[in-house]
Amino acid sequence: MNFANRLLVRCSERVRDIDAFEVELLAEELVERLLLFDHVILDSLRLKEVPELVRLFGYDETMELLNSGIISIRCEPFASFGSVRRAVGALESRRKKGKLPLFSYCLDPFEAYPFMPKKWSSYSENKTRFIQFIIEEFRKIDGLSGSEIVKLQRSVKEKIVSFRSERTILEISDGLKNDLETNDPTLIFAISQKAAQLSKINIKPEEIECKVEYLDDTDFGVSCNIQRLGDIDDISADQIIERALLGMAERNKKIQEMKEFECINAYRESEVPIFTGKLNFLASKLTDKDVSKRFTRIIELRGLPDLSGAIENGSISLATLLEIRDSAEWHEFRKLMASESLDVEELESAITSLSSKIRRWWDTDTAKVVRVLTVTALSGVLDQLKPGTGILLAAAHGITEKLGVIDKYVIQGIFPKSGAITFIDEKLPSIYEKREES
């Protein structure tokens, strides 16, 4: 299995300005990834994306996508790591130990779903009950029959992937503790980064002095000189270090996810994981942002509508998307987009070249009319020179037009193109099809 062809990606965001847990599906990002990767693992937020898929693409196309084998859904109670140094009201262990002062920290894995009534005997049991709980929300989807809801629930459950056991989560914790105990220089880079983001102060990593000392098995203190370097008050400095520590925990989590699910791990630029020094090169190989930028540029050059608006208007066909993924041209397109040696300027030139424009024009209704008029006029001239030859020319033209012979042997011979360009010119636009209302 080539992990570079598999992508774990979150294509949704929580709506923060309401009390209920609501999610906005970034459907254009999902469609884009389905066109760029062999297999997509959707990093789900409580399966809230599924009702949105049904709303935007309809039940039939959603089921077709789920049953296609090209998508999995990552869903489990474990979400990430959190700072629990002051969580005396939520954690019994913290209540006994008390709050930690400034520059002392405790990072723990947590389940970001506090509505769960309790923890069961094992993480596996907790996960099973959690999924069963949230999947019942599908019954609120408008317009579906009881049997359709059951089929949807079954298909989604079959596609769910997650960490195999809580031991995997403990490995992330152990790895983070080891990084901190050995004074991993990543923390210095992370502090520099967070200082710029939170306090708008630029501090060079090489100027930062930082040391971590564990107070017990879970709590630790961090001594750092950023207050002096950037004229930062203690509270702000404490927050900068805390965010940097959480960034390191998230980095370790993403690395474990790549190992567990045998995939690359996408991230948004706003999240900026902590890959520094020699790891910068690794980070560029383990994300999808460059491929995504290339795809966006292709959509612009090809003059195709914005994916987001087209999806909301019901103009994108998942069924057609799945169909063109089976073509040889799609595989060529995928290879081209993933290639490190791709010359973007050369690709742009190929898309906007005169030959591409002529090839696209050749299949239009206008071009067909022009061809008919041209053959008709030429037939008349030939008949005057030699009776009967014009009729033969017109008949030959009709046959070749029906069989596509002219396009195959004349246009392609004059203006040859690769499979990838064929995909961009012909197949990619085909997903912009208005769905018929059921």
Image (cartoon, rainbow, N blue to C red):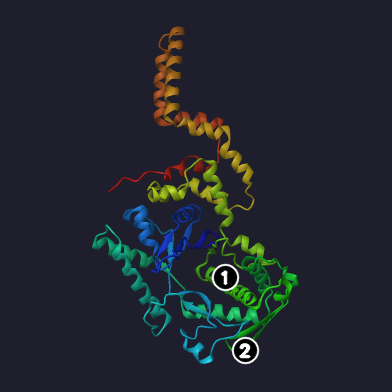
Q: Is residue 292 visible?
A: yes
Q: Position of residue 351 (x, y in %)?
A: 56, 39
Q: Position of residue 50 (x, y in %)?
A: 37, 61
How many labels, in total?
Answer: 2
Q: Residue at x 36, y 65 (%)?
A: 156
Q: Secondary structure at mark 1?
A: helix
Q: Secondary structure at mark 2?
A: loop
Distance of mark 2 from mark 1, alpha carbons?
27 Å
Q: Which mark is residue 255?
A: 1
Looking at this view, name the residue that lies furthest to the left.
146
Where on the picture, by quarter, is residue 249? bottom right
Looking at this view, name the residue that lies furthest to the right.
207
Q: Amino acid at mark 1?
A: Ile
Q: Position of residue 262 (x, y in %)?
A: 52, 67
Task: Classify 10 Å Cα crowding around label 1: few (below 14), some (14-19), many (20 and above).
Answer: some
Q: Is residue 67 visible?
A: no
Q: Which mark is residue 215?
A: 2
Q: Amino acid at mark 2?
A: Leu
Task: Look at the picture and state if 133 lies above or below 287.
Answer: below
Q: Residue at x 62, y 77 (%)?
A: 235
Where on the picture, by quarter, is residue 105? bottom right
Q: Residue at x 68, y 66 (%)?
A: 201
Q: Nearer the viewer, mark 2 or mark 1?
A: 2
- Which badge, 2 or 1, is on the more N-terminal residue? 2
Task: Look at the picture and state if 206 lies above or below 53.
Answer: below
Q: Position of residue 305 (x, y in %)?
A: 47, 44
